[in-house]
Image (spheres, rainbow, N blue to C red):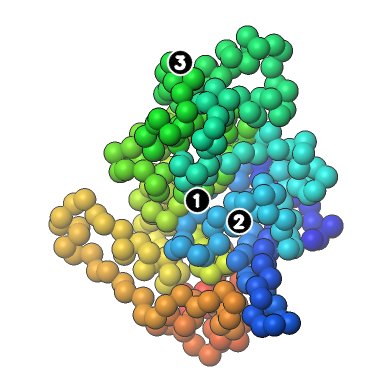
Amino acid sequence: MDMNYKPNPENLVEVNDLKMYFPVKTGMFSRTPLKAVDGVSFAIRPGETLGLVGESGCGKTTVGRALIRLYKPTDGDVFFDGKRVDDKSISSLRKDMQMVFQDPYSSLNPRMTVEDIIGEPLDVHQLYKNKADRREQILNLMELVGLNAEHATRYAHEFSGGQRQRIGIARALATNPRFIVCDEAVSALDVSIQAQVINMFEDLQHKLGVAYLFIAHDLLVVHHISSRIAVMYLGKMVETADADELNANPVHPYTTSLLSAVPYPDPKIAKTSRRIILEGDVPSPLHMPSGCPFRTRCKLATDHCAQEMPALTDRGNGHMVACWNK
């Protein structure tokens, strides 16, 4: 933690050198740190969506949970609206920072009705005057996410996956937050339902001015909803840029390979596009390679890559890339 670090007042959320290590038992008396997130920095402005992409196990979800203090970071700074997020401040900031979880089946209490699930944040933060006001707020939230009033007395198991995710979104919106972490919020849904939920996220942003950290592995979905995109690989940030710029002009070899795997609906483009297949497997975060973590799978890797991790450098218009050879 850098006590002298000063956040930019224009940013709603600012993250500086965030690290999240988990001690893993590797012997009878020895523990090795699993570096889930290793020195990540980024910022999100009010009303903006930052898409965070990368393959499974790269640390995306850990970043989201550490931001809102569901995990206590090993090191680094997180600021919300200029205020440092720590063990003391999180209780007062909690209602401004919410999360929509990946699995709509396990993130809802099966013993609670929809009304009680959505109303729980209102109860915790005492955000209503009386029972009638509580009921009215819950029904307004249900209408906002496309649920009917008669759904209020039902239980979560009576709903489809898409409807359950809407309940989770309504619960996150109950405290009128300014920032929501969307952790793979559409990955468990059918494609047709995904489109409805993504459009709803965008409508809510226009109505409420809420900012999102949108975590996903589907680059098409992320490009559609995000203002900017950040790409992670093995706990490190390797590239960040405006969404259209990243899609049209990827620089880092990992980003290029990710984009080459995106299926195109136009058969002419699909026929001419060339898939870049990465060799080898993702290294274990318990035994990270020295220098750049991507070098073991990169065709451009040199001795320099093994010696030192490249810093994110600006390649113009805020397009940040961490690569020695690009």
Say above or below: 279 vs 248: below
Which residue is depicted at the point 24% across and 69% down? 274
Q: Which residue is mark 1?
A: 215
Q: Which residue is mark 2?
A: 63
The amino acid type of the residue labelled 3 equals Ala
Element type at mark 2: helix
Taking 266 as reference, is 219 left or right? right
- Which residue is nearer to you in this view: 159 or 139? 159
Element type at mark 3: helix
The amino acid type of the residue labelled 2 equals Val
Q: Which residue is mark 3?
A: 149
Quadrant of image for the N terminus: bottom right
Taking 165 as reference, is 43 left or right? right
The amino acid type of the residue labelled 1 equals Ile
> In which quadrant of the rendered view does residue 268 lie?
bottom left
| Marks 3/2: CA–CA distance | 35 Å
